[in-house]
């Protein structure tokens, strides 16, 4: 026994329940996230990365300008100006790694933990790595 009025009533109730459920679910749902990174944060991140890159370039070029570096350039048969220019062609990660190694080598050399020959060998290795990365 199918009553049209009964079916309409059930459909109306079901529609009302469904509409209420949809409204309630959006009320209880977490608010929609805003931008994950604000434009200001993105700009600050870019500035910080740029400053870190410039600092790494400066440290590496300074290391390559030391008196020991002159001997290393001769041993590696490399042009100092060409290598110093090539530093800018390194990726941020490569630059950071080489700068960190150069800074550590300078500290160790200043502390007497590395001999002059040792620092020259490190310099030769860094020079060759720079040339290989940039020109190969």
Image (cartoon, grey):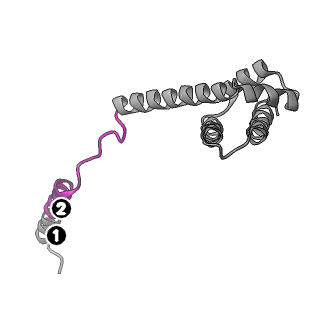
Residue 38, quarter of picture = top left
Residue 55, quarter of picture = top right
Residue lying at the far bottom in this picture: please name it.
Answer: 1
Which residue is more in the foreground, 68 or 26? Answer: 68
Identify the residue at image location x=61%, y=27%. 57
Which residue is more in the foreground, 67 or 60? Answer: 67
Whether the magenta-drawn stretch holds residue 116 is answered as: no
Secondary structure at numbered mark 1: helix
Which stretch is magenta?
Answer: 16-38
Compute the Cα span from label 1 to label 2.
21 Å
Q: Which of marks 2 and 1 precedes in the sequence?
A: 1
Quarter of the figure that contains the N terminus: bottom left
Which residue is more in the foreground, 83 or 91? Answer: 83
Quarter of the figure that contains the C terminus: top right
Whether the magenta-drawn stretch holds residue 23 is answered as: yes
Secondary structure at numbered mark 2: helix
Residue holding disc 1: 7
Which residue is more in the foreground, 34 or 65? Answer: 65
Local packing at callout 1 (Cα closer than 10 Å; few below 14, some 14-19, many 20+) is few
Above or below 105: residue 85 = above
* Image spot of residue 113 (x, y percent): 66, 47
Left or right side of 68 for 106: left
Local packing at callout 2 (Cα closer than 10 Å; few below 14, some 14-19, many 20+) is few
Frontmost of labels 1 and 2 is: 2
* Image spot of residue 48 (x, y percent): 45, 30
Identify the residue at image location x=78%, y=25%. 70
Above or below 89: residue 11 = below
Residue holding disc 2: 21
Left or right side of 43 for 5: left
* Image spot of residue 79 (x, y percent): 82, 21
Identify the residue at image location x=20%, y=59%. 25
């Amino acid at each position: 026994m199918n009553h049209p009025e009964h079916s309409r009533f059930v459909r109306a109730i079901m529609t009302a329940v469904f509409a209420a459920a949809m409204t309630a679910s959006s009320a209880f749902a977490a608010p929609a996230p805003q931008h994950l990174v604000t434009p200001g944060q993105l700009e600050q991140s870019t500035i910080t990365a740029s400053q870190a890159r410039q600092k790494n370039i400066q440290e590496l070029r300074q290391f390559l300008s030391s008196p020991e570096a002159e001997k290393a350039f001769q041993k590696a048969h490399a042009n100092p100006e060409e290598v110093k220019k090539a530093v800018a062609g390194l990726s941020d990660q490569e630059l950071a790694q080489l700068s960190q190694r150069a800074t550590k080598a300078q500290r160790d050399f200043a502390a007497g933990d590395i001999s002059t020959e040792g620092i020259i060998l490190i310099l030769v290795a860094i020079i060759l790595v720079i040339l290989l990365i940039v020109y190969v």
